[in-house]
Image (cartoon, rainbow, N blue to C red):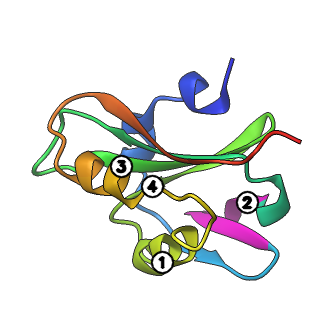
């Protein structure tokens, strides 16, 4: 089972602590209380946007960054997501149209934005 299917994106959206940041090695999301989750760029195998029907007064779009059996969930209103999107758009074959479609979605849905080529 894939990482993004095992976690409820609405629960992630409810977590308001922290920010997302990245460097040349990894993407990190601060969770608060000194906790964080991260994934290395070389591990990244899939980028999705998961939407819920919880908007417009709740953050109803969640970035799902998957690598192997791990990943991170980043609600779209998390500080740093604008810069992260710009960096994700540099991935070869990144589907910016999927981002546009996800941002306009008002239903529970999942939008594949990028998947690495299998080795």
Residue 19 shows up from this direction: no
Taking the image as shown, residue 114 lies to the left or right of residue 36, namely left
The answer to whether marks 3 and 4 mark residues whose Cβ atoms lie closer than 8 Å is: yes
Q: Secondary structure at mark 3?
A: helix
Q: Nearer the viewer, mark 3 or mark 2?
A: 3
- Evaluate if marks 1 and 3 touch, with contact meaning CB atoms under 8 Å apart: no
Label 4 vs label 1: CA separation? 12 Å
Mark 4 vs 1, N-terminal side: 1
Q: Which residue is mark 4?
A: 95
Kindly identify the residue that appears in the image at 41 percent across and 67 percent down. Answer: 78
Q: Which residue appears at 18% of the width and 37% of the height? A: 54
Percent from the top left, x then y, of residue 92?
A: 63, 64
Mark 1 crowdedness (10 Å alpha carbons): few <14, some 14-19, many ≥20: few
The answer, for residue 106, to whether it is visible in the render is yes
Spatial separation of the CA atoms under disc 3 and disc 2: 23 Å
- Distance in Å between CA atoms under marks 4 and 2: 23 Å
> Is there CB contact under 8 Å for labels 4 and 1?
no
Residue at the disc numbered 3: 98
| Residue that appears at 32% across and 48% down | 61
The quarter of the picture where the N terminus appears is top right
Q: Is residue 27 magenta?
A: yes
* Marks 1 and 2, how far apart at CA: 18 Å
Instruction: Please give the range of residues in magenta.
Output: 26-39
Asked if residue 20 lies left or right of residue 109, the reply is right
Residue linked to disc 2: 38
According to the image, label 1 marks what residue?
86
Residue nearer the viewer, 14 or 28: 28
């Amino acid at each position: 089972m894939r990482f993004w299917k095992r976690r409820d994106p609405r629960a992630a959206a409810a977590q308001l602590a922290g920010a997302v940041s990245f460097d040349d090695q990894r993407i990190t999301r601060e969770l608060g209380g000194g906790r964080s989750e991260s994934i290395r760029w070389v591990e990244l195998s899939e980028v999705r946007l998961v939407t819920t029907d919880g908007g417009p007064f709740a953050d109803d779009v969640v970035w799902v960054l998957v690598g192997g059996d791990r990943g991170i969930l980043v609600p779209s209103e998390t500080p740093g997501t604008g810069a992260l999107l710009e960096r994700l758009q540099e991935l070869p074959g990144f589907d910016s149209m999927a981002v546009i479609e996800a941002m306009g979605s008002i239903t529970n849905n999942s939008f594949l934005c990028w998947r690495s080529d299998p080795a």
